[in-house]
Each structure stands twice: as structure tokens, then as C-alpha cells.
Image (cartoon, grey):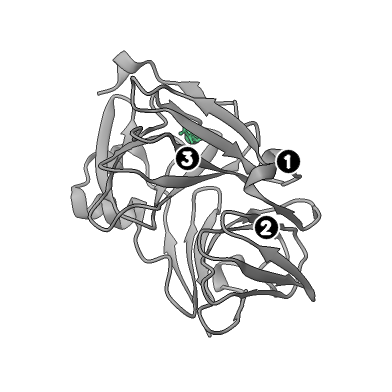
Amino acid sequence: MSTEFDIRHAIDPVSAAGMGTAELRENFLIDDLFADGAVRWTYTHYDRMAVGGAVPASGELVLEVIKPTGTANFLDRRELIAVNIGEAGTITVDGTDHAVGTRDMLYVGMGSKDVRFSGAGAKFYLLSAPAHASHPTTLLQQSGAKRLDMGSAETANERSIYQYTNSLKSCQLVVGLTQFAPGSVWNTMPAHVHDRRMEAYLYFDLKPDAFVVHLMGEPDETRHMIVRNEQAILSPPWSIHAGAGTGSYTFIWAMAGDNIDYTDAEKVPMEDLR
Ligand SMILES: O=C[C@H](O)[C@@H](O)CC(=O)C(=O)O
Ligand SMILES: [Zn+2]
């Protein structure tokens, strides 16, 4: 059983604009989320969002506290969402088993003490933010999420957005999944920013040689990162977050910050991007 974590500092837009490829990737890309038999966390100073992975493989993994939370248990002052991007698995919260199928999501409320992950083929993507209230631990299946269809085939951005957290109560976490129509590869274009909330993207379901060209930065000062299968990006509150794949992919988006209003974002006019 192993729990590992690293810490990412919050980067300002001027510093980010001066970074080369390696430095951008060090600060904004997470390329080692999933390892068999491990819980791996990236604890960020963007709204203290923690992004992680838990791959039980043949054993059982326990949600262990990490030093940055400064609490006796991981969820003493936090909430957690686990989305299963692998095969069916189980998450046990204080003795109660929750069957979490592929692309199902479990919300785990603040104050939960004993959280365990199991399932030989399960792969849990983890998101955690500070909480101010204890909401019930709730399972949400993809079919139960509010679905929003956007874009068109002509602009290669025809996609369905599943707003998972619309169907349950959370304090800060706003989480969903976006799926594309065949041939569409552009996510979140037209782009937007939301200074009230940071965001993290997990790109997955990519073929081995495929990648997403992820765009970040202030709208008039953009940079790109090449992102591979099952890698995540951190999007600071001042940054756009959009991308185009060389092939098909799916992604999970997650936000934390000052409000949970999904629609509270500033659209960036297409002509303003640089
Ligand atoms: O603030 C919200 C997030 O950026 C995602 O909802 C965007 C997204 O999934 C898309 O447009 O494809
Ligand atoms: Zn966004």
C-alpha cells in the first residue's frame, strides 16, 4: 500500500508566459496519476484542489491522510469525488460498499473516516477540495447526469457534456465528463475563463500514439502542451482550457473555487485569441 503526493504552487500569468515547454509541463501537466497498487495525489495551491488516482489492482487501497491537509483524516475538512475510468470496482465508505461501474462517480462527504478502493480492473480518478458542510455520500451513474449537447460536426466540436454534480450536493466540487461525436476533436472552443474557479482536465480513452494539443494561458497570450492518454492538466483561474485531439478522446473536467455555478464563465470571443 502506498500513498504518494506532490505539491504544485499557484503560478501567475506573467511567470507562465515566460516558461518553455519543460517548465510548462512541470507546472501544469500531471503525467503520473495512475500506478498499480498506489494512491497518488497532486496537491495544488489553486483553491487547494487535490487531483489524484487510485488503482487497486489486486489489492485494496485505503485513503490515507497526506501532510498538506493538516488533519487526522483526509476528509475531516474536505469532500472527495472518485470517477471510475476503468472496469467496475467498489468504494467502501465507513463500512458501506458502493459499486462504482465504468464512468460512474461517487461523491464522498466531509467527515467520512474510512475510505477503501478495490476492484482488479478499476481505475479511480480522484478530486478533493476543502468543504464547509457534510453532504451525503452519493453514487451517480453517467446515465443519471444532466446532459448538454454542444457544438457541431462542421466545427469539429460536437460533444455531450455530462454535468455529474448537478444531480447532487457538493460544497466546492463541480465535476463532469465530456464525450465527442465521431470525428469531433475540439473541446471547449469557443474558449472561456472563470476567475472564480480553477479547473483540472483528465484526458483519457486516447489511442497510444494519439495526443491532445491542450491550449492554456490568458486569451491573448496562449501556450500549448501535448497531452497523452490518462494525463491531467491544471488550469489556473486566469487561463483558458481547450484542446484538439489527433484522434478521439474523452475528458473529465473538475472545478473548485468561489461558487458552483457551472454557467458563471466569461466567453472569449474567437477573434480575441492570440
Ligand atoms: O467550465 C467548464 C469546463 O471548461 C467544461 O465544461 C468545458 C467542456 O467540457 C467543453 O466545453 O467541452
Ligand atoms: Zn472551464
- Taking the spot 61% from the left edge, 69% from the top edge, the residue there is 89
Q: Residues within 10 Å of mark 1 (few under 14, many from 20)?
A: few
Cα separation, mark 1 vs mark 3, equals: 18 Å
**Camera-nearest residue between 207 and 178:** 207
Q: Residue at x 70, y 43 (%)?
A: 144
Disc 2 element: strand
Q: CA distance from mark 2 to mark 3?
A: 19 Å
| Residue 167: image tag | 1
Mark 3 residue type: Gln
For mark 2, what is the residue? 106
Residue 2 in sight from this viewpoint: no
- Where does residue 46 sit, x and y in percent of width and height? 50, 48
Image quarter where the C terminus lies is top left
Residue drawn at (59%, 75%) of the image: 119
Local SS, label 3: strand
Label 3 CA crowd tier, 10 Å (few <14, some 14–19, many 20+) = some
Mark number, residue 179: 3
- First in sequence: mark 1 or mark 3? 1
Which amino acid lies under the numbered mark 2 shown in the image of this protein?
Answer: Leu
Sooner in the amino-acid sequence: mark 1 or mark 2: 2
As drawn, 92 above or below 145 = below
Quadrant of the rendered image containing residue 264: top right
